[in-house]
Amino acid sequence: MSKASTIEDKMTELRALVAWFESDEFQLETASAKFTEASKLAKEIEEDLAKLKNTVNVLKQSFDS
Amino acid sequence: MEKETVRLSVSDFVALTNQTLEYAYPSVEVEGEVSSFKVNQQKFVFFDVKDDNSSVGCFMTIWQLRQPIEDGMRVIVTATPKLTNWGKFSLTVRAIRPSGEGSLKKSFELLKAKLEKEGLFALERKRTLPPLPKHIAVVSSTQAAGYADFIKILDDRFGGLHIEVAHVQVQGEVAADQMIRAIKYFNTQEELADVLVLIRGGGSADDLSSFNDELLVREVAASRIPVLTGIGHETDESLVDLAADVRGATPSNAAQILVPDKREIVQQVRHLVRGIIPTVEHAIELEQQQLRQVLEASMQVFHSRIELAENERNTLERVLAQLDPRAVLARGYSIVRGKIEVGQHIEIEQLTKHITAEVTNVKSINN
């Protein structure tokens, strides 16, 4: 489970993981674990997107005067 | 029975007339053409509204004048009829708005030029909207079709948004003031929304004229919260649109601008993860290639070592072969063993024969 709480944070985390594969820090030994992590994160983002609902609050006050 | 004639002082007559007028017409809208428009002391506005047969004087303060007016424009005034203490009848105007396409356009152009000169529509004032707003303030009429479209598209595209709605009138005399108060309300909250959206569906030029109100345009330009508009149809452009940070062509388009489509995000996420696979495959291939190169280099060293050893052995073999006495014998030479003195027996070894012979003569050879 990712530590990031919002979809935006999770997207940032996913982009960082993907960037690791293109960076000088890339190591074949740890690539499998990182790939699994990225796949899980992607799944979490998809699930979040599917279940999040909007809340609409119509203000009670009048703007007459 | 004859009705009693009422005798009044002039002041009482004026007061009674005004009372009667106020009772009969607490508020009246009069439509006509403006003439003799003038502003006195930068405070008081005087003009006449007229048609083919009649004309009536109007009075209002400059602060009530929300859109530019000039002679020849067709207008609708919202007013109260009044008889002044000097016996002059006039309309005390609360609001005035251009009427008819020509006048609306003229007023629009005049105000646009004025505000443009002040820099209210300058591109450098425009702020970008947050890519993924969480808290959205909406100023709209909740009964309007445009508002329903906006909310529906937001729901369809993205979730987890907190939408706060100020329900206001979006057309008519009070619309601009209500929208101004709503914008002020959102801008004075402790926790500001990420974006403020003004929404109104399509309508006639007159219906949308509230969005060309000078004070409303100034309020939009002064908003601390970035403003997005979705007003009318694609072809409708209001001054509020010009003052806003971002203009959506319609309420639906405003929703599309505001949040990304979750389906596109899912595609993007999948694309990101899929993009890793070729990178890993390439890295594995590179690693295999390097391994092959190392193995090939090792084999090459091994083979050259063997070749070297073989060459060395061949050389030794050749040397050994040359040193073999049998090779000399093969060329026809013989090995002689024994004392070389006359009468002595000697052993002569040839390649294929062993001979015993007696020495009969010894003669030295001087070379």
Image: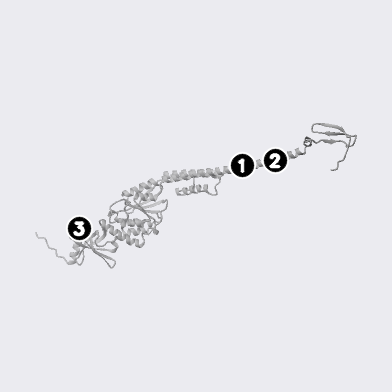
Q: Nearer the viewer, mark 2 or mark 3?
A: 2
Q: Is residue B55 above or below residue A53?
A: below
Q: Chain of mark 1?
A: B
Tell me what residue is drawn at x 34 percent, y 47 percent.
B149
Q: Is residue A65 visible?
A: no
Q: Residues at badges 3 and 1 in contact (C-beta under 8 Å)?
A: no
The secondary element bearing badge 1 is classed as helix
Q: Nearer the viewer, mark 3 or mark 1?
A: 1
* Tag shown at residue B309: none
Tell me what residue is drawn at x 84 percent, y 32 percent.
B355
User: Disc 3 to disc 1, how far (Cα)?
Assistant: 109 Å
Q: Nearer the viewer, mark 1 or mark 2?
A: 2
Which three-letter amino acid code belongs to the residue tagged 1? Answer: Glu
- Residue nearest the observer in this picture, B166 or A35: A35
Could you tell me residue B4's position as x and y percent?
Answer: 12, 62
* Tag shown at residue B296: 1
Mark 3 Cα-neighbour bin, 10 Å: few <14, some 14–19, many ≥20:
few
Tell me what residue is drawn at x 52 percent, y 48 percent.
A22
Name which of mark 1 and mark 2 comes first in the sequence: 1
The secondary element bearing badge 3 is classed as helix
* Tag shown at residue B24: 3
Q: Quadrant of residue B302?
A: top right
Q: Quadrant of residue A65?
A: bottom left
Q: Quadrant of the N terminus of chain B?
A: bottom left
Query: In the image, are marks 2 and 3 on the same chain?
Result: yes
Could you tell me residue B329's position as x and y percent?
Answer: 79, 35
Could you tell me residue B170's position as x and y percent?
Answer: 30, 53
User: Disc 1 to disc 2, how far (Cα)?
Assistant: 22 Å
Query: In the image, are marks 1 and 2 on the same chain?
Result: yes
Name which of mark 3 and mark 1 comes first in the sequence: 3
Which three-letter amino acid code belongs to the residue tagged 3? Answer: Ala
Q: Is residue B300 visible?
A: yes
